[in-house]
Amino acid sequence: MSAVLVSLRVAVPAEEAFDTFTEEIGLWWRPGALFQITPRGDGTLSFENRERLITTLANGKVFEIGRVTAWERPTRLAFTWRQATFAPDQVTSVEVVFEPAGAETRVTVTHRGWDTIPQDHVARHGFPLQATQMRLAEHWRAQLAAISRQLTDKSG
């Protein structure tokens, strides 16, 4: 199974990075034009009861993006990931690892499973796998930059 892997260092302990990722995802998550969660946009993301990742759309409708498969504060978080256009049997997975790196924390996101989504699927925009993964990596880099800004704003 192929994977997209991106990392970024943040200037906070792993506990704070983990908590901001999970408890404040609705504040720092930035919608991406290519990887919208639903045709109506991304809505407001949240982790519900450490069991599932959901988004609440402007009209109040809730869509389950995925199920939490690991909640190991402060080192690891894993969950399944589905976009609203995925068929019931189509699913990808995300793992986020929080590793101490001196006074900082390296946050690494690994997103697997896009090779199981057909190239002609609307979520892939007709891109071959390598182009899909390159654009997905750009999307996750933007998300990690957003969480870094959230952490900086909190501490500054």
Image (cartoon, helix red, strand yellow):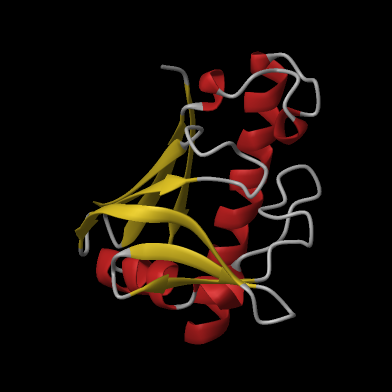
What is the count of numbered marks? 0
Counting from the top left corner in percent of width and height, residue 142 is at 66, 51
Residue at the extreme left: 72
Instruction: Say which quadrant the N terminus sits in.
Output: top left
Counting from the top left corner in percent of width and height, residue 67 is at 36, 54
Seen at 66% across and 82% down, the residue is 60
Relative depth, front residue between 70 and 98: 70
Counting from the top left corner in percent of width and height, residue 140 is at 59, 45
Instruction: Say which quadrant the C terminus sits in.
Output: bottom right
Relative depth, front residue between 93 and 137: 93
Task: Inspect this view and state whether residue 114 appears.
Answer: yes
Vertical side of 15 occupied by 105: above or below? above
Seen at 69% across and 62% down, the residue is 42
Side of 77 relative to 43 (left or right)? left
Task: Inspect this view and state whether residue 11 appears.
Answer: no
Side of 133 relative to 23 (left or right)? right
Seen at 68% across and 70% down, the residue is 43
Side of 59 relative to 73 (left or right)? right
Relative depth, front residue between 111 and 87: 87
Seen at 34% across and 57% down, the residue is 105
Counting from the top left corner in percent of width and height, residue 88 is at 51, 39
